[in-house]
């Protein structure tokens, strides 16, 4: 009976094993509705739906899995953990560790140093050079069985440079505390006291002490100036305090004034010492951390809309004056009432750089718009215009980054523009860009200030959007170069025509056969200013062409620019 029972059990196991074997053969696999455990398998097969219900996306639509992080190479690991370990911020460190390619890391390193460059106009980076000089100095002078840069003195030296004054007691020994330490006499470990007149973010008259308690040459940054007290340390108690009972033979005082001074020092400096101890080891702050940082991140913001135009005026051989004009609509600004005035403040930051990233010029300024209560409603419908002039090399291409920030709303406007500067050189006639103006007015010939809208002896406020309404005059300003002079009169002989085109059709033409629109003549340039009525033009887009014929040299040129005619005049 027992043998029959065992035999039955064996048959059941054999059948189960056969079933599992069959299902594991190619072409005979099945997906049961429940998990089946085969004898000796040790795990369950995962449940899945029937084959006809499983959906597989084509390979070109399948979402790739996350890319594996490329392990840091020896160079990048050393850069992160040694070269910049003291000056890199936690945010920067997190970003660097998240990068997956060496190309990304190299770009990060380039931007890392650029953000700290005190003068981006220079091809060299003074901050980077000084940083590596400090590391070399620390390794040479603070070695203590470990590289000098890893010691506390090395860290402070790398972060803040050499102290203004230094007191060194490499042998320790007898020491009299000064009044700021509470006074008294004791025996001290070897120590150094470094004094800085100023440290950014820390304050004035910063004193730091480094104590060698192990007598191995490794000096540790002390939080309290009495940490160097060897007697107190060996006795396993707190350092001597002024006025306290003591039997060690140390000098004591019961002078009330001294005790009051010590109490005052302890109240004022206890938390300051603690804060200084940590603050002095923090990475230094990055210059231009606000608006300049927006340029570095290459992000575009459109919370604060604005309009911008650039023009090009030849200033000297190889140099071009570039007026950068910005226009804001006051209705987009956040006005706040202050001292019976409604005031909006916009900070401007601009950066001109080469295509290789070298900063050529940068500027920052404030656009201030303010109106008294009785003028505020009308003022909100006007525009605010700002201009900055930069001098660039002719024939080069640049990048212009502009960041505007409304200081009341904190809204940002950020855009990047290509800036191709024309050559404006050569033997033939050359011309500046045509500046379509709102107003043009003369200034005294002795005026020598470089300010907004002033070019030579004229003040030209550009029409940034090149929009005019019926009833307004189209006012072009143009400079022409390499014009020949009539040797009998020492004057140019020019024929000038102004054609307004709509597409291929000339809809308006104005001739100036003897150059009456010439406002200025010199050996360097001819300045042309005209006033063209456009009252008969229907709203739409047009092109203004200015043709100049030099009748002395028999040379000509045509300069052109677009403008729009709108229904109603823009408030200015």
Image: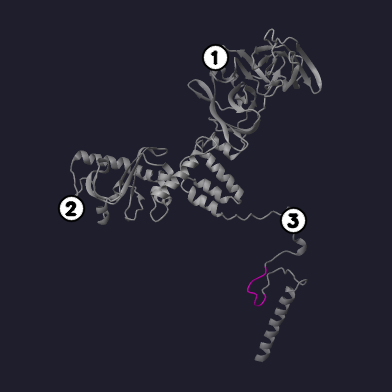
- Quarter of the rendering containing residue 272: top left
Does residue 158 sit above or below 42 in this rendering? above
SS type, badge 3 = helix
x then y, percent, for residue 414: 60, 33
Q: Nearer the viewer, residue 501 or 550?
A: 550
Q: Who comes first in sequence, dot 3 or dot 1? A: 3
- Please provide the residue range marked out in magenta: 38-45
Q: Is residue 285 above or below residue 12?
A: above
The mark that comes first in sequence, 1 or 2, is 2
Marks 3, 1: nearer the viewer: 1
Q: Left or right: where does residue 356 sit relative to residue 262?
A: right
The residue identified by callout 2 is 247
Is 43 within the magenta?
yes
Q: Nearer the viewer, residue 486 or 208?
A: 486
Which SS does the magenta portion mostly show? loop
Magenta stretch contains residue 463 = no
Residue designated by label 3: 59
Q: Residues within 10 Å of mark 1 (few under 14, many from 20)?
A: few
Considering the image in quadrants, where does the N terminus appear? bottom right
Instruction: Say if 318 sits above or below 58 in the image.
Output: above
Q: For the view shown, which residue lies furthest in the front direction?
A: 487
């Amino acid at each position: 009976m027992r043998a029959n029972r065992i035999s039955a059990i064996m048959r059941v196991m054999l059948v189960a094993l056969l079933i599992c074997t069959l299902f594991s053969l190619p072409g005979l696999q099945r997906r049961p509705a429940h998990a089946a455990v085969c004898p000796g398998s040790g795990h369950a097969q995962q449940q899945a739906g029937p084959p006809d219900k499983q959906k597989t996306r084509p390979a070109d639509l399948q979402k790739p899995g996350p890319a594996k992080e490329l392990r840091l190479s020896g160079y990048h690991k050393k850069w992160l953990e040694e070269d910049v370990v003291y000056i890199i911020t936690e945010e920067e460190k997190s970003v660097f560790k998240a990068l997956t390619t060496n190309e990304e890391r190299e770009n990060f390193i380039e931007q890392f140093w650029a953000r700290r460059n005190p003068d981006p106009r220079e091809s060299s980076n003074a901050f980077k050079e000084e940083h590596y000089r400090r590391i070399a100095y620390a390794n040479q002078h603070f070695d203590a069985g470990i590289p000098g840069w890893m010691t506390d003195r090395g860290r402070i030296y790398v972060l803040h440079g050499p102290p203004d004054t230094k007191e060194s007691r490499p042998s320790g020994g007898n020491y009299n505390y000064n009044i700021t330490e509470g006074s008294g006499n004791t025996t001290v470990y070897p120590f150094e006291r470094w004094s800085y007149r100023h440290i950014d973010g820390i304050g004035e008259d910063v004193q730091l002490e480094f104590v060698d308690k192990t007598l191995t040459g490794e000096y540790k940054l002390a939080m309290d100036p009495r940490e160097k007290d060897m007697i107190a340390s060996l006795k396993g108690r707190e350092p001597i305090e002024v006025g306290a009972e003591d039997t060690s033979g140390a000098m004591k005082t019961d002078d009330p004034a001294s005790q009051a001074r010590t109490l005052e020092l302890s109240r004022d400096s206890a938390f300051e010492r603690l804060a200084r101890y940590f603050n002095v080891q923090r990475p230094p702050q990055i210059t231009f951390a606000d608006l300049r940082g927006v340029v570095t991140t290459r992000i575009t913001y459109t919370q604060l809309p604005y309009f911008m135009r650039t023009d090009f005026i030849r200033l000297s051989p190889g140099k071009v004056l570039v007026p950068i004009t910005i226009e804001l609509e006051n209705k987009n600004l956040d006005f706040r009432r202050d001292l019976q005035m409604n005031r909006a403040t916009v900070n401007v930051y601009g950066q001109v750089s080469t295509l290789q990233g070298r900063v050529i010029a940068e500027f920052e300024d404030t656009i201030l718009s303010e109106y008294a209560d009785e003028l505020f409603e009308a003022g909100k419908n006007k525009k605010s215009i700002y201009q900055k002039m930069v001098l660039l090399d002719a024939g080069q291409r640049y990048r212009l980054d502009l960041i505007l920030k409304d200081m009341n709303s904190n809204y940002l406007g950020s855009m990047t523009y290509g800036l191709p500067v024309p050559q404006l050189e050569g033997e033939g006639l050359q011309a500046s860009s045509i500046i379509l103006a709102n107003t043009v007015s003369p200034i005294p010939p002795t005026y020598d200030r470089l300010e907004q809208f002033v070019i030579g002896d004229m003040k030209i406020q550009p029409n940034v959007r090149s929009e005019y309404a019926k009833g307004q005059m189209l006012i072009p300003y143009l400079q022409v170069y390499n014009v020949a002079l009539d040797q009998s009169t020492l004057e140019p002989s020019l024929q000038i025509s102004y054609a307004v085109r709509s597409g291929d059709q000339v809809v308006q033409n104005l001739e100036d056969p003897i150059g009456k629109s010439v406002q200025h003549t010199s050996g360097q340039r001819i300045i042309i200013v005209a006033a063209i009525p456009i009252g008969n033009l229907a709203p739409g887009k047009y092109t203004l062409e200015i043709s100049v014929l030099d009748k002395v040299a028999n040379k000509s040129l045509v300069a052109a620019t677009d403008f729009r005619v709108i229904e109603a005049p823009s408030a200015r």
